[in-house]
Image (cartoon, grey):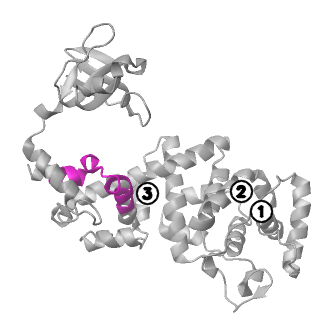
Amino acid sequence: MAIKAAGTQNPYAGPDFFNAQVEINGQLWAGNVEMHIKSSDWYAHHHETDENYDSVILHVVWEDDVAVFRKDGSQIPALELSRYVTGQLLVAYRGLMENSKPGFINCEKDFGTIDSFLVESWLHRLYIERLEHKSELILDLLKKSNNDWEAVLFMMLAKNFGSKVNGPFFLERAQQLDFSIVRKTSNEPYQLESLLFGHFGLLDEKDCTDGYYLQLQKEYDYLSRKYDLPMRTGKPEFFGLRPPNFPTLRVSQLANLYHGRQGLFSELMASLSLKDVHRIFDVGASPYWHDHFTFGKTSRKSAKKLSKKFIDLLVINTLVPLKFCYGKQLGKDWNEELLALVAEVEKENNSIIGNFERLGAKAKNALESQAQLELYTNYCAKNKCLQCSLGTQLLNRNT
């Protein structure tokens, strides 16, 4: 017996895996797979009366204690796992799963003993896996925008200029705005800023008497009629944000990034170093914001430029995932170039990265910190030790 394709796991009612392929005695079978502790559970769960199980081609069990038959009388082949898994391996697995509860990760007591080369190789693979996950949103936006990469870039930048608090709201608004209007207004900074402030819900105050605010509001009303802009509801959040992250500043900075640029996507795709990227993102808010964080309230004067840390986040969350997707569409393997670029970026600092550092895995750059986030989120937190190269290495070492 040989498993040619495991199929797709089914989280709902019915067989556990759909569309599997199994070779039995030289015959290739295609169908569904059901899993139980004991094969007699088939009858305990009344699968013999459920037509959803008629296409099961393999019964995977720990103990094959009774034969299971289809409605036509043919026997469903069983794969008895207890014949292939040693008691020593079971003890090692239980030890791994119960080792550190309620600690950080299951293998934290043994993490420092894993070969450093294996850890580094696995982290590099996990970073590509993380890019694959981030690609899902980009590919969806690309489809909705009729393959307009410039429009997708704008939507992703809007999302990430909004950060965690306002990112979803900014992305939704960016999707509702025809990017051709951004193109048409990009040579007029005042119009572009009016467009974005209005569209992102920052010009809806009824009692604001600030002169600049009223000018922007008037200009947006004109643009709204000219381009038949969609009606909007809602506004971005300020609560819980530090003033440099206020949506007012971020929208002005986004507008200035696009001022005078018709090919920002091409410019970024051609950038090969972090220095090139920082030069492109070397922008600030418009002069009004030099002594404001919100409309109508003055503050100490300072240039509100994008910080190095913020630009690094744009590289991690916007530029590199876009380059990854664009390279795949062109049929080019840019992985080495992307790994080199993100390796130039400083690592992030959060509790997950700090916990890995406590275990002796100090991230050297953003590539490794992003990979650690992928490792924790999609493996450690989900107890997927058997799918993790580090977990399987520990299990094999202890058996």
Circle 1 — which element?
loop
Identify the residue shown where x is 67% and y is 88%.
302
Q: CA distance from mark 1 to mark 2?
A: 18 Å
- Residue 366, how many percent across, how many down? 40, 66
Q: Are marks 2 and 3 in contact (CB under 8 Å)?
A: no
- Segment tinted magenta in the rendering: 372-394
Q: Is residue 215 above or below residue 62?
A: below
- Residue 352, how many percent across, how many down? 37, 68
What amino acid type should be assigned to the residue bearing mark 2? Arg
Classify the position of the N terminus by image quarter: top left
Q: Earlier in the sequence, mark 1 or mark 2?
A: 2
Residue 71 in the magenta stretch? The answer is no
**Residue that numbered label 3 is attached to:** 338
Residue 379 in the magenta stretch? The answer is yes
- The answer to whether any part of residue 339 appears in the image is yes
The local crowd at label 3, few if under 14, some if 14 to 19, many if 20 or more residues have their Cα within 10 Å, is: some
Q: Nearer the viewer, residue 332 or 251?
A: 251
Q: Nearer the viewer, mark 1 or mark 2?
A: 2
Circle 2 — which element?
helix
Q: CA distance from mark 2 to mark 3?
A: 29 Å
Q: Nearer the viewer, residue 284 or 271?
A: 284
Q: Nearer the viewer, residue 275 or 165?
A: 165
Q: Main secondary structure of the magenta part?
A: helix
Q: Earlier in the sequence, mark 1 or mark 3?
A: 1
**Residue that numbered label 1 is attached to:** 186
What amino acid type should be assigned to the residue bearing mark 3? Leu
Q: Are marks 1 and 3 in contact (CB under 8 Å)?
A: no
